Image: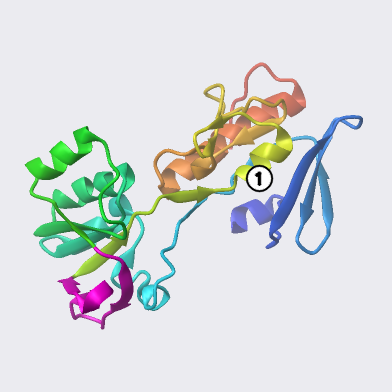
Amino acid sequence: EAQATKHGATFLAREVTHAVRLENENRFLVRTADRADYFAKYLVLAHGANYIKAHLPGEREYAGKGIHYCALCDGALYKGKRIAVLGNGNYAAEEAIQLASFARGVTIITHSQGVNMSAAYQKLLDTQGIGVITGRVKRINGAAGAPMEIMQEGGKLFSCDALFIALGVASSTAFASQLGLEMNGNFVRVVDQNLRTSSQGVWAAGMARGGINQIARSVGDGAVAAIDIIKAAKGLPDYIDHT
């Protein structure tokens, strides 16, 4: 951020609520929650994707301290530990399988009365000894260095060292709707290796287009999109970074 600022970039901490193409002017209007308007010839969507929260008592207090949302990001912290995954679909199964590679035991807890995942995932869960228990979770209790207690309906308690919430991700599809972009599920679809979208002048980078949720990947996407924008702005067939 300091390097970008040094070279003239401006960072504004604002919530974007509106993004549209001004057809007659061949540029974009981006409006923020404080009703400020910004205009640009090119637009990169890098809004990420927010993990869906369960909104359970205790969730906010223990987020990052026993409660997590990404097995790939934080699972290795609990090697040899007992882990629970909250969810009931293919996404929850995928997270549980990822965690099972280093955890002492993994259990899926589902709010519903049954699981909603494909037969292929159910077979993988059985093969790896990943159990599923049902019953709506009411609250989460825990303390630093102590096992967490997950309280379900009827007073049932389940003890574990960590809870990974795997209810899916909530994507900012409003931008795609406003800009008329094609989607790939809940994410913006890119049409080429330069991360251009289906609408001219719009790029998508990082978790805005789905895939692996890692900082290194998102930074790389940003660089790819930025270089393609430089080529478009300057009319260059190629670009060589001499810095």
For the point 38% across and 54% down, the residue is 167
Q: Picture quarter containing residue 132?
A: bottom left
**Which residue position is annotated with label 1?**
174
For the point 68% across and 63% down, the residue is 13
Asked if 10 appears above or below 236 in the picture, the reply is below
Question: As rendered, which of 120 and 241 lies closer to the eye?
Answer: 120
Q: From the top left corner, tell me how far across and down residue 141 is, in percent.
A: 28, 80
For the point 75% across and 20% down, the residue is 235
Q: Is residue 242 visible?
A: no
Q: From the top left corner, tell me how far across and down residue 60 is, in percent.
A: 42, 74
Q: Is residue 135 left or right of residue 222?
A: left
- Quarter of the rendering occupied by the N terminus: bottom right
| Mark 1 nearby-residue class (10 Å; few <14, some 14–19, many ≥20) | few
Which residue range is magenta in the image? 135-160
Q: Indicate the amino acid at tag 1.
A: Ala
Question: As rendered, which of 234 and 202 lies closer to the eye?
Answer: 202
**Scheme of image coloration:** rainbow
Return the residue found at the far top. 237
Q: Is residue 28 left or right of residue 228?
A: right
Q: Is residue 98 visible?
A: yes
Q: From the top left corner, tell me how far across and down residue 161 is, in percent.
A: 19, 70
